Amino acid sequence: MLGSNACYEGTTQAEMIFPYSLVPEDITPFEVPADNPLTLAKVDLGRRLFNEPSISLDSTISCASCHKKDLAFADTLSITPGIHGLTGDRNPPSLLNAAYLQSINKDGGVAKLDIQALVPIEDENEMGISIVKLIDRLQADPDYSRQFTAAYGTDVNGYNIPRALASYVRTLISFDSPYDAYTNGDISALSQSAIKGKALFFSDRLNCASCHSGNLLTNQSFQNNGLYNNYSDLGRALITLDSADVGKFRVPSLRNVALTAPYMHDGSLNSLQEVLDHYQHNLSGHTNQSPQLRSFELDDDEVQDMMAFLESLTGSQAKRGLNQ
Amino acid sequence: MTKLKHALALIAVVALSSLFFYACGDDSDSQSVLLDFEFDFRINDQKLVFGQVYDLNESKVSFKVANYYIGGLQMTQEDGAVIDLSADYLLAGPGNIFSAAEKVPNNDIVKFDFFIGVDEASNSQTETDFTSRPSTDPLGMKDPSMHWNWNSGYKFLRVDGEVDTDGDDIPDTPIAYHIGSDPLLKNVSISSDRDISDDSTIHFVLDINEFFAGVNFQVVENQDTHTGNNLELAQRLVSHLDTALSVE
């Protein structure tokens, strides 16, 4: 269902949200599953659930605990604690433009956004509650029961909980950065330094764009970026069971990257400066390290130019905390 | 009077016919049975009881979850007929019962063919996923879960418990064996001479001792596998299913 005008049963045209109404004209709209068309009722319900601590075992952790709207729906902590202060292995990613992901999670283990929310809900280090128990909990709340029925035509169940959350996440769109304005012809949108940084970014010398390409500035491939020699988190290999995938994680989108420190799958690098240092001097040479990575040296001016370019990828709404 | 004789004769014929057909139907029923399936877990030649402390591989252990999926089930009878239940999944767990929908001839079953796991299409979650299945569906959402959340797919087999690691004989270190992913689907074929005429309840038996044969629970690397993070252990345990599984 891509940009379809079709009405869905029980849903009026006015209640529908079409992908192309959320993204600029020059950006291809994201796809919406036919069995979960976007509606205002679902998005409202998903927003409420997103900020609802009661969807964790001890009612202390919501999605928003780790995905803060003023941080491009990411967090400043390397690993955000879940219930009982427990911590997992990975840095919470930005949720902006998650509607475009071909597979979900940093290792691509989840096939579709519509069931992704079960990851944090059931993970013992995050919200730690069985979806079966969560259904009972939400069904006991008449207000939620009513809202689910209004959105999905059925009471709370395991099908519509993650799909309501996915519906909200699909509306978290960010294509309004100075870089976008520049790309669309506003040559004043970028500073001279950012323009130089852009040229560096897309140069063969740095080769960043071999992976950070397209509108999302990611080709969504899984790459080992030479962070470690020994990976405690095996990454993509956890899913494929292939040792050639050890240490591979999906190339992240660089949109709003200036808001999403710390960096890397485990949040081990604290700043964009550290990231640039890593790619210049600290590649581990792991056997699976991406062949796209090239050794390069930047002088101080070039580092500043790269920083200016990366900061130009911050969306204006994201900068304001995406008023959702 | 003649009419009365004819009427009596007709009644007699109808009555005898009824008896004949009833007898035939009764005879047919006695030659077919409805199969039920139950799932037993044995440890140290006893029925596994959750929470009870057992000596296993020189460790004190207790268990709290034991489940696995049986799929693709086909049973060959002595006359070569095949009872095909491959459209169904059986979630094996203590106390779980699966009843076949239709009666089958009560000939002996000489072979059980099935797999432990979930077929690749269902396991991918790309179309119908576990959230869209009713709770009564073995592949629907369960608590404790048989679906992975971080990895689209099912735990084909799940055994959770605790082991004593500090010598106080109290098992309190978690152990968890969650095995799944397409390459680890395990095909099983078991020869049998199972007479189903008197007892039509088939028991699938998982012997915990055989399943954990040679596993030293004191070694940290042996205390859990979620398949991808400890593939060697997951593969080793799957290989034990040949000897750990039986049908009674």
Image (cartoon, rainbow, N blue to C red):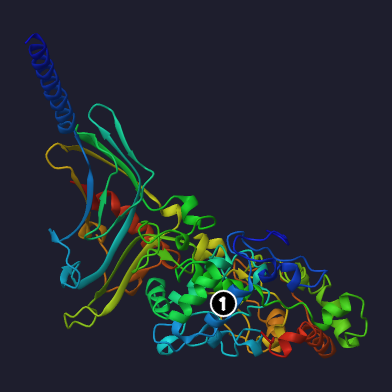
x%, y% of residue B27? 14, 28
Circle 1 Cα neighbour tier, 10 Å, few/some/many (<14 / 14–19 / ≥20): many
x%, y% of residue B63? 23, 70
x%, y% of residue B48? 17, 63
Q: Residue at x 46, y 85 (%)?
A: A87
Horizontally, is A291 left or right of A163 in the view?
A: right
Horizontally, is B205 left or right of A184 in the view?
A: left
Residue B167, by quadrant, is: bottom left
Residue A294 seen in the figure: no
Horizontally, is B218 left or right of A114 in the view?
A: left
Q: Chain of mark 1?
A: A
Decide: is A95 above or below A287.
below
Which residue is nearer to you in this view: A201 or A144?
A: A144
Task: Kindly state the secondary structure of the residue where label 1 is placed.
Answer: helix
Decide: is A236 above or below A124.
above
Decide: is A199 above or below B149.
below
Q: Residue at x 36, y 65 (%)?
A: B142
The residue identified by callout 1 is A46
Residue A198 seen in the figure: yes
The quarter of the rendered structure image containing the N terminus of chain B is top left
Q: How many marks?
A: 1
Q: Amino acid at mark 1?
A: Gly
Q: Residue furthest front?
A: B1
x%, y% of residue B105? 22, 32
Horizontally, is A123 left or right of B191 in the view?
A: right
